[in-house]
Amino acid sequence: MTDTKHPAREMPDETGPLWELTRAGQSVWLDYIRRGMLENGELEQMLTQYALRGVTSNPTIFEQAISGSDDYDAALQSAVYESVDAAAAFEALAVADIQRAADLFRGVYERTDGGDGFVSLEVSPELAHDTEATLAEARRLWQLVDRPNLMVKVPGTDAGLPAIEQLLSEGVNVNVTLLFSIAAHERVMEAYLRALETRRAGAQPLARVASVASFFVSRVDTLVDQQLQEKRRQASGEAERARIDALFGRAAIANAKLAYRRFTEVFSGERWERLHAAGARVQRPLWASTSTKNPAYRDVVYVEELIGPHTVNTMPLPTVQAFAEHGRVQRTLDQDYARAERELAALAELGIRLDAVTAQLLEEGVEKFAQSYRELLSCVQEKLVRVASGA
């Protein structure tokens, strides 16, 4: 593993809501990457301006970056000369971007002693139900990128879990993605603890093994609100409609809060303390899909309502900018668990089963990322053809 030192940069005026968020124990990761941002210094400026402590990527992000700019045309020209296919061309583009971003965030990684400063790259979503293929792909990407602050993104599917545990036991940092349910989150945390215990039993160091559990938020409200709208149309009177109205936009936050409560329970007690004493870090919950899909809701609601220690919020750039402008910081994540329980119970009374919602979202999420990956390769292929023809 390459271990080139990068000097820590001087931090500018560390004021504003995003810096307050960091001091409250929540890391801000940018859910976007594009080569132009790396080349023109924009991402480096954002690092300090917006208190960024990491970057996440996925096929959709890369598809938008490649199709929506000419940043990659010169590199694609080289791919044409080398006669590589679209998948190989994309991988070369993505790896180069991830390496450069990882180098940029290496100072954060060093200052936090390996606790932050990570950049995530996803295994092919088409491998989500294949354990061995996921394991092989994740190992290959880990070696190819060759940066200690890389996190390989692996979906938390049934097939993904054994790969996640094995990778972590080998010291590969993992961003477990596509978590929607508390039950799935529990399984992921258990896999993390078992991996650490395997390393400890083998006298391997624990301190630099890092992982986050990416728990998706706004998509839960999108689906539940659709079901609530149908329940409202069927309501028999104003009192019932008022009861339903009070639940709009609440399922996602309640679900995430109770997932966080479970996180605090898992990472406490004798089992965890033994690992912590050996240098282990908690597997932080990462709030994903935190842009507001419903314009009727506050544009930073999925940030403000989920603030607490030992967490990450990965935000698209518009959400980062909105929070920098008018975000309010106070510890909200572990407040009023009873309300969260009441809200989920009220949904169940209406016949809205959260386990069915989250199962549907996981299935849809895997397919959406796979479709994005196919669209990404189609986009790269189209650009390769255009570059080859001189268009």
Image (cartoon, grey):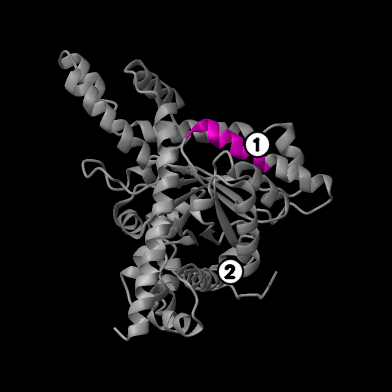
Task: Return the residue nearer the eye: 76 or 347.
Answer: 76
In the image, residue 174 lies at what x, y percent? 60, 52
Q: Is residue 110 left or right of residue 76?
A: right
Q: Main secondary structure of the magenta part?
A: helix
Q: Is residue 226 visible?
A: yes
Question: From which residue to which does the magenta span run?
Answer: 181-192
Where is 287 relative to 87, above or below? above
Residue at 39% x, 31% y: name it.
Answer: 357
* Element type at mark 1: helix
Residue 218 magenta-highlighted: no
Residue kind at label 2, given as amino acid type: Arg
The residue carrying pointer 1 sits among few (fewer than 14), some (14 to 19) or many (20 or more) residues within 10 Å by Cα, namely some
Quarter assignment of residue 115: bottom right
Residue 31 visible within the image: no
Closer to the eye: label 2 or 1? 1
Residue highlighted by disc 2: 106
In this picture, is 362 found above or below 224? below
Check if residue 184 falls in the magenta segment: yes
Image position, residue 280 (x, y; %): 71, 48
Whole-percent x and y of residue 151?
A: 58, 58
Residue at image position (72%, 49%) is 169
Q: Residue at x 41, y 64 (%)?
A: 377
Q: How many marks?
A: 2
Q: Based on the displayed image, in which of its 4 quarters is residue 336 positioned?
A: top left
Q: Residue flagged by tag 1: what amino acid is it? A: Glu
Helix or strand or loop: what does disc 2 sit on? helix
For the residues bearing labels 2 and 1, Cβ distance under 8 angstroms: no
Which residue in the protein does label 1 denote? 190
For the residues labelled 2 and 1, the Cα–Cα distance comes to 29 Å
The tag earlier along the polypeptide, 2 or 1, is 2
